[in-house]
Amino acid sequence: MILSIESSCDDSAIAITEIATKKVIFHQKISQESEHSIYGGVVPELASRLHAVALPQILSKTKEYFPKLKAIAVTNEPGLGVTLMEGIAMAKTLSFALNIPLIAVHHLKAHIYSLFIEKEVILPIVVLLVSGGHTQIVRVKSFDDMEILATTMDDSVGESFDKCAKMMGLGYPGGAIIESLAQSGDKNRYILPVPLANSPLIAFSLSGLKNAVRLLIESLGGENMSHQDKCDVAASFQHTVLLHLLQKSKKLLAKEPIKNVAIVGGVAANQYIKTGYEKLCNSLDKKLHAVDLQYCSDNAAMVGRYAIELYNNKIFTKLDLLQANTTQKHKNNTKL
Ligand code: KG4
Ligand code: ZN
């Protein structure tokens, strides 16, 4: 079995995965959403302190598996330096105490492998990765052959949902709140500009849309606007994000011979976006693969799943060399 740890942002999670069967034997996550909500976003120092409490709490429930562990896996990039360090310190301690190897896991590769939790891999596959930190389309040929085909030029999709919700005084994280309000909203009441609509670039950009929605919200009275106005803004915003994702993905996927397509990351939990993307895939004769809802947002089971590939290929990291890689600060230049 592999014990895996995730602490790259505001979720503390630990999983135990059986290497041969890929079964998730144990998984627990403690989310810090309510603690960060009052600030409208993640406060790194607070997140780090909360991980220091939550991770040992979860770990204490995994002791019975210690004799069966073959390796310790931990997310080491990209993420917040101070929160990554919490998971890494725990991983190093366990590796040293149990005398088993360490596996360093790239958070985005883990999101991609969330597709294959308790399943065999489906490769090659083209993946739309939409999370709070990233928005990319990645061609995945194997666990160590991933190529970024398109990326955002500024904000990520998840971040834009969060900001839209924050501007309407709806709390953090905003994605699920916007999706739920949009169900009672009219997406055609306000027309927002589809980003890069007239540009030949195959890239994403969310900052212009964020500005347009900010002006709209201000014109409607900001946080004090009526509930129905909030629902209509949410529906219009969500629809415009979908149109942007579809327009750029269509151009790219139409030229791509690979038949398998997937959406991963926190935003993959959004049913409206998933359904729209599925229609696009069907029209292009592609098959859309989905991540189980429980594994869309950050979790440790995906870290364990990707770690199985590294374990089977004997790719380990030495105790003294494992560090949080915080050089990849900008979401649009993250390397895979
Ligand atoms: O993958 P994730 O848990 O963390 C990162 O790696 O960034 O993604 C979190 C993001 C947040 O921005 C959150 O608002 C968004 O995913 N999200 C959603 C939904 N559920 C979570 N966005 C849109 N619709 C949702 N239902
Ligand atoms: Zn993530």
Image (cartoon, rainbow, N blue to C red):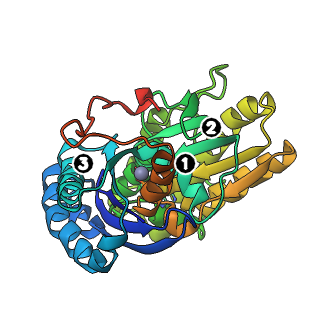
CA–CA distance between discs 3 and 1?
Answer: 19 Å
Q: Which of marks 3 and 1 is nearer the N terminus?
A: 3
For image coordinates 44% across by 58% down, the residue present is: 304
For image coordinates 60% across by 60% down, the residue present is: 291
Q: Which of marks 2 and 1 is nearer the N terminus?
A: 1
Q: Which of marks 2 and 3 is nearer the N terminus?
A: 3
Check disc 1 and report its element: helix, strand or loop: helix
At which x and y percent is residue 318? 26, 40
Amino acid type of the residue tagged 1 in the rendering: Ile
CA–CA distance between discs 2 and 1?
Answer: 9 Å
Check disc 2 and report its element: helix, strand or loop: strand
* CB atoms of marks 2 and 1 within 8 Å: yes
At which x and y percent is residue 213? 46, 45
Amino acid type of the residue tagged 2 in the rendering: Val
Q: Indicate the quadrant containing the N terminus: top left, top right, bottom left or bottom right.
A: bottom left
Disc 3: which residue: 84
Would residue 240 appear left or right of 231 to someone viewing this image? Answer: right
Disc 1: which residue: 112
Is 199 located above or below residue 94 in the figure?
above
Is 206 located above or below residue 58 in the figure?
above
Residue 131, disc: none
Would residue 254 be visible to someone looking at this image?
Answer: yes
Is 21 located above or below residue 163 in the figure?
below
At which x and y percent is residue 245? 63, 41
CA–CA distance between discs 2 and 3?
Answer: 25 Å
Disc 2: which residue: 140
